[in-house]
Amino acid sequence: MKKLQRRTILKGIAAAPILLAQGRVWAASGVPTMPSEVDLAKAKAEGKLTLYTSLDTKIVDSIIGAFKAKYGITVEYFRGGSADVTSKVLAEADAGRIQADMVDASDLAALLVMKDRGLLLAKQSDATAAIAANLRDPDGTWMADRLTQGVIQYNTKEFGGEKAPKTWKDLTSPAMKGRLAFFSSANGDGAPRLYTLAKHLGWELLEMLAANKPIRVATPQLVTQLLESGERGAAFATNDNIAWRSKLNGKPTDYVNPPEGVPTEPGAVGLIKRAAHPHAAFLFHEFWMGKDAQGLLVNGGKYSSRSDVMPPTGSPPLISLKLLTLDYAEYKRDRQAILRRMTDVFGGEWGI
Amino acid sequence: MTRPLQASLHHRGRWDGSTIVFCFSIGLLLLIVGYPLLWLLMSAFGIPGEFELGYIAHVYTRSQNLAPLVNTLILAFGSAIISVAFGVPLAWATARCDVPLRRTIQALVAVAYITPPYLTAIAYIILLGPDAGYFNRALQELTGATRGPFDIFSMGGVIFVVGMHVFPFTYFMTHSALRSVDVSYEEAARLLGARRWGVLLRVNLPLVAPAITGGALLSAIDSMALFGPQAFLGLPAQITFLPTRIYGIIGSYPPRWAEASALSLTLVLLTACGLMLQRAYLEGHSHTTVGGRGLRLENIRLGWWKWLLLAFCLGVVFLSALAPVGVLAIAAFSRSWISGIAATNFTLSNFSEALFNNQIAVRGIFNSFRLAAAAGLCAVVVGATVAYVDLRTQAKGRRFLDYLAILPLGLPGTVMAVGVLLAFIRPPFAIYGTIWILLVAYVARFVPLATRSANATLRQIDPSLEEAARIAGASRLAALWRILLPMTLPGIAVAFLLVFIPALSELSATILLYSGGTETIAVAIFRLNDLGQIEVVAALAVFTITVTLLVSLPLNWLSNRGRTVPTGAVSKS
């Protein structure tokens, strides 16, 4: 896999190089591997499909609602953190019975592991043209559907005006002691973005943040809740889309993309090779990656991976941010050691 | 009739419809309890693969595993202390004193026990979250402090919430011991000039000490097995316990089965030690004087002291039952739980979301009901069979069966789930990913409750009644169906409900075993809480607690009825 770099992401998003993989992929009989092979009648006969996703349910609900309205096909979903999604898929694969037809996770390394295990379908997609080459698998097993930035979010009552944190360094000040929050489930799904920070800005930053005794919760939604209620004053590396929605809903919070750089996390989607509902799943994949559904994603505050979809209202264009990226192949390889280091720095449970 | 009656009975007893039911039940028991435990053992020692006895010791050379072990022991110890500190005074007050509202207090203790502990944990996040919690904010306003004095996200917080759930063990055991104490001892002590407190400390206390110790040990054992409070309150504080550690190991990718099994076995060992301690203690100190049943217990008149004791009792039931359930109810009807009670904050939309709109919640309710009903039925069939084979036959290995059917009582849900996962993720019984694996886990977890209940019921019925039917020419199946079943029906209903109630809100095993489409109420609550939708969680919680309480009402009524089986049918043995 080509290294994911800020420059190439931006280039891809800005210019949208058209690069269609021409090699035709042959698969088991009846399983579509390109959009033209999707049989609408068969998809409707399958009637439903199952999606495993780590995306916020409000966005998922809006997209599957639109899909149902258009095709009459029901999408049932399992929603958990990206490590939940991955461990479920891997365990189900061990049992020889993957329930999911389509998998979506905000941890690209997870999709790479699934690809290594031979669980993902190699296919072509109509969305390929709109996605930067480094945001999709050359073999066509996965493509990024969204980009999430790990921002600083804060309570404006506690840290309003002058006191508002602007940089990562601001969060390391003694004034932040006992006032910080961050997220990761017990299985370590918050680690990639924290590692991105460590890689670009040094582990010392994480150690100084840890020294301020941050509270840790399982999800960015819970982080926002802590900030909205005033339980904590500021959070690091929390989801920009959740912070965006909190502000939009008039809650006493705001967020900032620090100038030192902000970790960006591509979420990615793939189809399961031996899915029970191959046609419905492929149809849904194309819908999910299409401009309309990606618009719904943006309405939920996410940045689309499509170069032809605008950023969320009121959000800065990615080109204006200093994006910190991660080589996910490397992350996949070193993941155990990285999680071990997270345990050393923050304590608690990281699934290692 | 030329053939001897005995031979004919024997012959008919060997193969008929009941034999099929028996074999099926016993096979089921071996499959769902024995088979997973076998896998758990094998996996912890690295089988299949290289046999390595030192693996368990190796696991604990990692600080990531050692800390959860220590934390789990601290939690067990702490909640046992709370259990005694709250359970014993309440038991004394309601069993022997003239404190008012005794029945109400007892009922509320039962509510504290029945409320799933993870719901109590969520309630206490609302009540004692360090800054935004209701209690803390109230105290902040009173004292003018910038921060509330309590932090529920701490070891103390976990111990407190778990203690609130387990103290009923000590309460109920001490209560029944106090009710059966022979009053003549007290009277003798009084006649000899002992004062009230002297009687209490030197006569009553030693007599009920085994019950107190038993309750404390049960509390400790149960606290180690819980998952919810440890997950909801421990994770934010970076405190890991064995169940949450096991969850982390399996929930991460790739799942590390051997490590999870080794930790599970440790949890089993701890539980077994606790149970053995309890048994050893009871055997050494069993000078209970149950002879006093005939004497009328007179309630001790405490004078003004009773108001103080009442205040304490009300305080405990307020903290353990009224406040958590109440605050969940408030949040369930609120647009935002932070805003508290106000007309503008009132809404019913959380209930429509929880019961009709939210995909996972709706599916969870449907799944939980059908799983709990199916688990209840299966557990009753298996439990009744085990009890029957144990009490009515001379079959070889019947003690083993009975032991196997009781064993899961000492197994934490997390442990049972790891075993079930290992066993049923691969052929020949690959049911992981389907709803069947949850059914297996629930039956395995709760079959002891059904077995014990069936055993108690069957003991009350004299075998002569079935024998009479057999002599009159009925087959064993007919004797079971037409004589035993009608007489034991209330007991069977109790056994069913005893399984149905905990299965309806089971979390610790489910969280490791569910998949897309097989979510339960507990999973929906866990996941929605993750997403910060506390109000919808509260609505689901209120629904669950209401259903649980409604279902418990017939349980109460039936078990009272069970005790008043016509005396003619009650065996003296």
Image (cartoon, coloured by chain):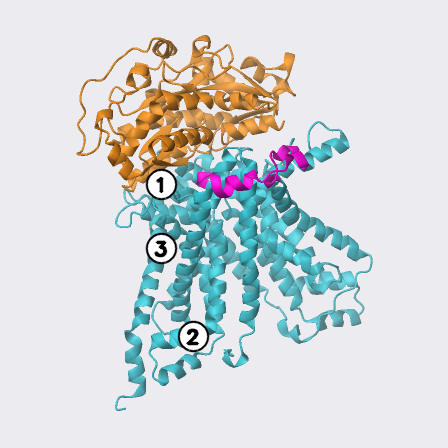
Q: What whole-number distance in Å separates the C-alpha atoms at marks 1 and 2?
A: 45 Å
Q: Are marks 1 and 2 in contact (CB under 8 Å)?
A: no
- Which chain appears orange? A
User: What is the x, y in percent for residue B159?
Assistant: 59, 43
A242 in the magenta segment: no
Q: Amino acid at mark 1?
A: Trp
Tell me the SS state at disc 1: helix
User: What is the x, y in percent for residue B239?
Assistant: 53, 36
Judge depth for marks 1 and 3 and give the one in front. Answer: 3
Q: Residues within 10 Å of mark 3 (few under 14, many from 20)?
A: many
Residue lying farthest to the bottom in this orientation: B2
- Circles 1 and 3 on the same subunit: yes
Q: Residues within 10 Å of mark 2 (few under 14, many from 20)?
A: some
- Which chain appears cyan? B
Q: What residue is disc 2 on?
A: B484
Q: Nearer the viewer, residue B282 or A219?
A: A219
User: What is the x, y in percent for residue B194?
Assistant: 79, 66
Q: Is residue A10 left or right of residue B345?
A: left
Q: What residue is disc 1 on?
A: B257
Q: Residues within 10 Å of mark 1 (few under 14, many from 20)?
A: some
Q: Amino acid at mark 3?
A: Ile
Q: Chain of mark 3?
A: B
Q: Residue at x 47, y 69 (%)?
A: B489
Q: Are marks 1 and 3 in contact (CB under 8 Å)?
A: no
Q: Chain of mark 2?
A: B
> Which image quadrant for residue A45?
top left
B339 in the magenta segment: yes
Q: Nearer the viewer, residue B79 or B366?
A: B366
Q: What residue is disc 3 on?
A: B32
What range is drawn magenta here? B331-360
Q: Is residue B220 left or right of residue B442?
A: right
